[in-house]
Image: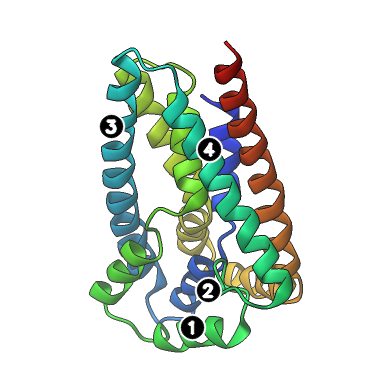
Amino acid sequence: MSTEAALLGLVSALRATPLAVIYGLLLAPRPARLLLAYVVAGLVVSLAVGIAIIAGLHASSLGGGDGTVRQVIDLGLGLAALAYAVASVLGWAPPWLGTREPRRRSWTARLRNPSTLLAATAGAVTNLPGVFYLAGLVAIVQTGPTWTNALFQVVVYNLLRFLVPVGALLCVVVDPQRTRRLVDDVRAWGTRHSRHLTIALAAVVGLYLAIKGLSGLLGAGGT
């Protein structure tokens, strides 16, 4: 498993909009059923898109490419993340990781008594691939895997990305009241620190990807 992809998967698990949805589902009368619908729909969408993208990238690498396309993707994703970090500092950016409290309250209010279909729709919509997801897929391809190994890595990457909802589902089945108290504590901490966490993650990951992509392109150009 690509270490870079694994780390990006863990980072993706901290996206605050999905966390707000999960919090809302936990407050619903039957949270286990709703969380299951959220997880299944989200994983189906995330895996389907991930496999489609990895197939294209893997096919291009098998065609004897020199990796320039993947380095350009790394550079582009890195610059996008850095631009988001700068825009967040200046107050220009939308809440990519859900940093605005009114938006989190809106998600929670909508999901206080949702249907299974609404929970599944939320799972599909809030887990569409973003910058970190695409960067993780590129990292997987850069390990030079076989097609079977690439699929395995995509599955593991998505499981890491869904650690929070899967963990919440397991916990709510065992002890729903304690799970809600724990989520309340985590949410309170996230409310205080989410903006700084968002900026820090975007800046660190963006800088890493930009340097990685640029150094690869410069190295290729010098050969």
Q: Amino acid at mark 1?
A: Thr
Of callouts 3 and 4, which one flags the residue occurring earlier in the amino acid sequence? 3
Q: Residue at horizontal 58%, vertical 33%?
A: 213
Q: Earlier in the sequence, mark 3 or mark 1?
A: 3
Label 1 close to label 2 by CB (< 8 Å): yes
User: Which numbered marker is on residue 20?
Assistant: 2
The amino acid type of the residue labelled 2 equals Ala
- Which residue is at the far left? 117
Amino acid type indicated by mark 4: Asp
Label 4, residues with CA under 10 Å away: few <14, some 14-19, many ≥20: many
* Mark 2 to mark 4 CA distance (whole Å): 29 Å
Upstream in sequence: badge 2 or badge 4: 2
- The residue at which mark 3 appears reads as 56
Q: Mark 1 or mark 4: name the one nearer the start of the chain.
A: 4
Of labels 2 and 3, earlier in sequence is 2
Tell me the tag on residue 74.
4
How far is disc 2 from disc 3 in space, using C-alphas? 33 Å
Count of numbered circles in the view: 4
Judge whether 159 appears above or below 172 on screen.
above
Is label 3 or label 1 in front? 3
Q: Residue at x 57, y 66 (%)?
A: 97
